[in-house]
Structures are given as structure tokens and as C-alpha cells.
Image (cartoon, rainbow, N blue to C red):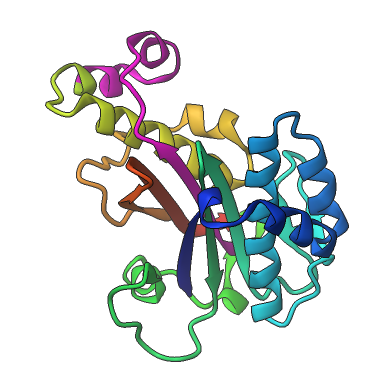
Amino acid sequence: MIIKTTIKSINEFEEGWFEEVFPTLPAWRREKAEKFKTEKGRKLSILAGKLILDAFLDNKEDPDNVVFNEAGKPLVGGDMPFFFSVSHSNEAVALSVSTPNDNGSVLPGNNLIDATSVFSAAGIPPRSELKSSKGLSTPSVGVDIECIREYDENIAERFFTKEEQDYLKFSENKEEDFTRIWTSKEAYGKFTGGGISDGLKFSIFHNPLIPIDVIFPCCFEYESIMLNGNKYLYTICHGVIEV
């Protein structure tokens, strides 16, 4: 499986671009964009929709072939030839797409992650052979992007585990570590399909994940990026879930 992440800013596009793109989006994505009350939110949603549309077309899949789980996570219908997750923050949109690895190894760079070796090291068999105690298992991906957030002790005390709170108290870079923990929880919730409620049950120290490396049944990748003078951090969680 290969995970490719695309990061775009709404500032990269002219004002008229969003209105031109909107009618081309699948109905389920147009409906989501229309729910945003602010112009900025609508632009972010349209840009996210365009990235999703391009991913579907690149994978020769019908962009209307989408189903939603109980938590509202969109999934590719049918045989699910690929998996996707989208996130936006401030002025940035991130889309992570995972596809089967049919072309051998992947060279580093371009935000491409070859997860095949990760699954192999963890003893995870090909998708067609995956089984679990609940039935079938399937690969999944979750992404979350955040503009580096100011450390908020009240949020940490409310939503983070004691280990995570203690880690932040002694951190020399509280803002980035605070953001990294939050994006881990968001990405994990998208990976499982359970949303933020799953993410808040998850602790980065349970496995442990400092520094983050391969865990079972998922692993995490962190990257930072500068856009329009703002620093963002995005987290990708990928692996296998039970379905």
C-alpha cells in the first residue's frame, strides 16, 4: 500500500476558481460545502472536494461511489480500491490517499510512504487474506493537519492523558508537541472511523509512541510544512482495522 499526501492552501487559487469548481464536485461533497457559514470555510471545503475528486478520477473510480459509516466517515464503495482521508485547518487542506502497491518499492520524497514493508514486518498478510475475530480486516488511513497551536493547559487537562500532560509540562517545544498529540488523536479517530471520540481514548504513550514508529495495527507519520508564513503539522495514521 502506498500513501500519498497532498497539501494545498486556498490562497493558491483565484477567487473565481472556487465557484468554477463547485458545480463539478460530487453531490455529497457539494452538500458538505454548503453547510459552512463562512466564506473561508466554504473555500476550504471546496478545495478539499476538488482534491478528493481528482483522487477518485486518478484511481478510475466514480466520485459518487461513496458510503458513510455510523460516525460519518466517507468510504469508497464497492471493492474499495483505495482509501482516503481529508483535513483542513486555517488556510490549508490535506488529503491522504492509500492505494495498493502494484509498482514495487517507492523512492523517498513527495510525501509517498510505502507501507507494504510496515505491514510485512508486523506480520499483516495481503488484504485478500485478512481476517479478524470480528470478520474481515482492511487497510485504512487517517490524516489531520493543524496550524501550530498555542499550548493550552486547560485543553490538555480536559482531553489528554496524564502521561501526555506530564510530557508537555517538561517539553522544550510545547506548541509543536501539543499540536502533535492533538493531530495524533484526530488522525487515529479518522483511521478507525470512530471520529474524535476514538481519538480521545487513544494515548500516544500506550504503545509507546515517543518517538513514533511502527505499532500494531497502525503506524504514524509526522511532517511539518510552511504555508504563507504559517507553520503547519500534519499526522498520517495508517494500518489495518477490523470491519
Dividing the picture into quadrants, the one containing residue 149 is: top left
Q: Nearer the viewer, residue 69 or 11?
A: 11
- Above or below: residue 91 compared with residue 57: above
Picture residue at 57% right of the left edge, 70% below the top: 130
Q: Residue shown at 38%/20% (left/top)? A: 160
Q: Nearer the viewer, residue 82 or 22?
A: 22
Residue 236, horizontal then vertical, whole percent: 43, 53
With respect to residue 40, does 102 lie above or below? below
Q: Can you see residue 137?
A: no
Q: Is residue 192 left or right of residue 104?
A: right
**Does residue 145 belong to the magenta stretch?**
yes
Residue 90 appears left or right of 85: left
Q: Count the labels in the image.
A: 0
Closer-to-camera residue (88/184): 88
* Residue 59, quarter of picture: bottom right
Is 11 in front, or is 5? 11
Magenta span contains residue 4: no
- Residue 239 percent location from the top left of the image: 47, 59
Looking at the image, is 23 positioned above or below residue 82?
Answer: above
Residue placed furthest toward the bottom: 103
Q: Is residue 190 visible?
A: yes
For the C terminus, which image quadrant?
Answer: bottom right
* Picture residue at 30% right of the left edge, 82% below the top: 107
Residue stretch rendered in magenta on the structure: 138-166
**Residue 173 at x, y percent in the picture:** 17, 29
**Residue 146: quadrant of the picture:** top left
Q: Position of residue 53 (x, y in %)?
A: 71, 66
